[in-house]
Amino acid sequence: MRIGILGLGRIGAFHAETLSGLDAVESLVVADPFAEAAKAAAERFGAEVADSPEAVLAAGIDGVVIAAATDAHPGLILAAVEAGVPVFCEKPVAKTMTEGVEVLKAVEGNDVPVQIGYNRRFDAGFVAARAAVQAGELGTLHTVRSTTLDPAPPPAAYIAASGGIFRDCSVHDFDIIRWVTGREVSEVYAVGGNRGADYIREAGDADTTGAVLTLDDGTIAVVSNSRHNGRGHDVRMELHGFQDSIAVGLEDKLPLRSVEPGVTFPAGTPHDFFMDRFTAAYRAELTAFTEVVSGSRPSPCTVADALEAGWIAEACTLSLKEHRPVRIEEVRTV
């Protein structure tokens, strides 16, 4: 099949590399506002270069991957759907939930599939955890712990436009908690602080946060996030039930050092970048998109799915600001 790519920054170029290695993909058509980025992709992957998103959509493509700046996501999603082209778009759907809801309303009832990029749904460990929960292996679930710790904060310009750590980083934890447990979040309580980069504080954001989520069946989920984790990129989940407990991310590249005498685990080189931690997941995610394009499976992460994680992020942002528990229904507008 022939796949278009809109946006060739860090993640767009990574997706181009992944797509070029998939058997189902025969050719790529790429576009980026920076001509040199498109030219580099063309030279590296044998892609065709188009001079605009409209030209990509008109180039006889079977599907399109949107990896452009967040502000451009709503317009590009809707343009692709209007053109009848299946869409994969990196999260978030839009910069604001208001815009996200507008996209949802516009695509509802349309036969053109849209897949939003929450790659943890394709990580082997999280897939196994979901299967264990669905099979009842843990018994009644009572506690979930989900962690995303970055080795260093992103640049100041990124922080200023990110919408805050809950909307930018924690949404991955929120989405995967919903997906693995099969439950919805009913209430949140969030805390946060600043122990590092001044520009994060100046942007009105926290660099380290914690959130307690109450799920609709009474399960308690604890989410921990930080922009400062010097040992590496740490993404994990624990699920505890009355019958068993399991963990995702408990492997030799886990960026954690044991001080127990005689313990050599973990023994590998710690993950230091999200692309390192989730290389296989990204490949599985884009493989799934080619199946969506071919019509052999529905979208594994719809616009509606992505907005659910967004409402949790909105509730946590309000909770941190007002120092109180917030029910999801307080922020939800649809």
Image (cartoon, rainbow, N blue to C red):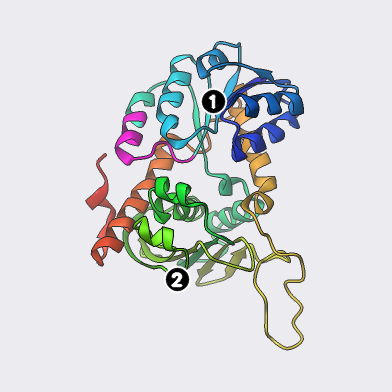
Residue 92 included in the magenta stretch of the image: yes
The quarter of the picture where residue 165 lies is: bottom left
Residue 331 included in the magenta stretch of the image: no
1 and 2 marks in contact (CB < 8 Å): no
Vertical placement of residue 193 versus 78, above or below: below
Vertical placement of residue 265 versus 52, above or below: below
**Quick one: label 1 or label 2, which is nearer the N terminus?**
1
- At 37% from the left and 55% from the top, the residue drawn is 203
- At 67% from the left and 79% from the top, the residue drawn is 258
Number of residues whose C-alpha sits closer than 10 Å to that of mark 1, classed few (under 14), some (14–19) or many (20 or more)? some
Name the quadrant of the C terminus.
Answer: top left
Q: Position of residue 121 (x, y in %)?
A: 56, 47
**Left or right of residue 95, residue 175 in this image:** right
**Tally of numbered tags:** 2
Q: Which mark is residue 33?
A: 1
Identify the magenta region.
91-103
Residue behind mark 2: 195
The quarter of the picture where residue 235 lies is: bottom right
Q: Position of residue 298 (x, y in %)?
A: 53, 30
